[in-house]
Amino acid sequence: MEPVSHGVLGLALAVAVGFILGLLGGGGSILALPIFLYVFKVPTKSAVAMSLAVVGMSAAVGFLSHWRQGNVNLRVALPFGLLAMVGAFGTAKVAHGVPANVQLTLFVAFALAAAVFMLRDSLRPALRETAPTGPPPRFSVVLGMQAVAVGVLTALIGAGGGFVIVPALVLLAKVPVRSAVGSSLLIIAMNGLSGFVGYIGVVPIDWALVGEFTGLAAVGAIAGTMVAPRVPTRRIKQGFAVTIILLGALVVARRVGLLG
């Protein structure tokens, strides 16, 4: 694949990808794919693979910050991440046979669903972090099935699945909200990098762009993680949800030829 022009806009957006991921525990991946497609003009299947690399690495950086703060539950996150890796790697190996239009349609559906859930969550009263009660967080068969599904979806659409993972950890495994955010970053890192490795040799990769974008996203992830405990996220979620809806509309408009 020929190297693409690394525009200032795209690289500034790379920082935003990492910042959102570190701040909210998910969402950066939804920005990465459209940036590769429409700012850097990367072909669809390569854009999916490259977004997985960026999200995996920036999530790993964000995870380290949460780990130092004690906001990671390895007992739940590791088995979830390992099963997601299996789904992501296996799917990446066969994803070349999936039409690009199908992948983009799935991406738009996922992005819009994430936006709806984020808006709904932002309109609810803020959850208070309370002292743990009852049995400790635990992994389950149902959670394992969801982990594999997250891995499959990740490899198909180039999104880390943070908006699915965090609620699953809270509702199904009873992980406290803040720990669920930190744990989701570990899962996203495992999941995204496994999917990316599965794509190596299957689709062309612009390694220079991946490295540059990933480095800037990692900086953004560190910044987002540092300010997360001190920033009320309700308005951020609302604004980001609207951004996701606009991005989904952009992808649809480009695919049906309404925009050049």
Image: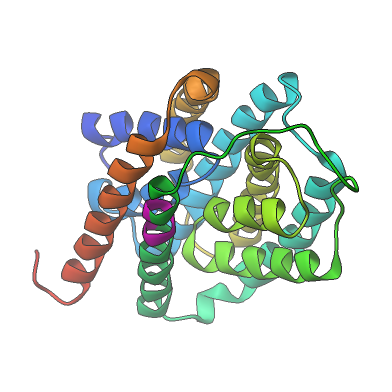
Instruction: Residue 252: name its quadrant.
Output: bottom left
Q: Residue at x 50, y 63 (%)?
A: 203
In the displayed image of the protein, which residue is found farthest to the right? 135
Q: Considering the whole magenta stretch, tell me its main secondary structure.
A: helix
The image shows residue 54, relative to residue 241, as above or below, that is: above
184 or 200: which is nearer to us? 184
Q: Residue at x 70, y 68 (%)?
A: 146
Residue 9 is situated, as x and y percent measured from the top left of the image, at 22, 33
Residue 152 is situated, as x and y percent measured from the top left of the image, at 63, 69
Residue 126 is situated, as x and y percent measured from the top left of the image, at 49, 39
Q: Is residue 123 visible?
A: yes
Write down the region rendered in magenta: 115-119
194 or 116: which is nearer to us? 116
> Is residue 63 covered in magenta?
no
Q: Is residue 3 visible?
A: no
On the picture, is 191 further left or further right than 162?
Answer: right
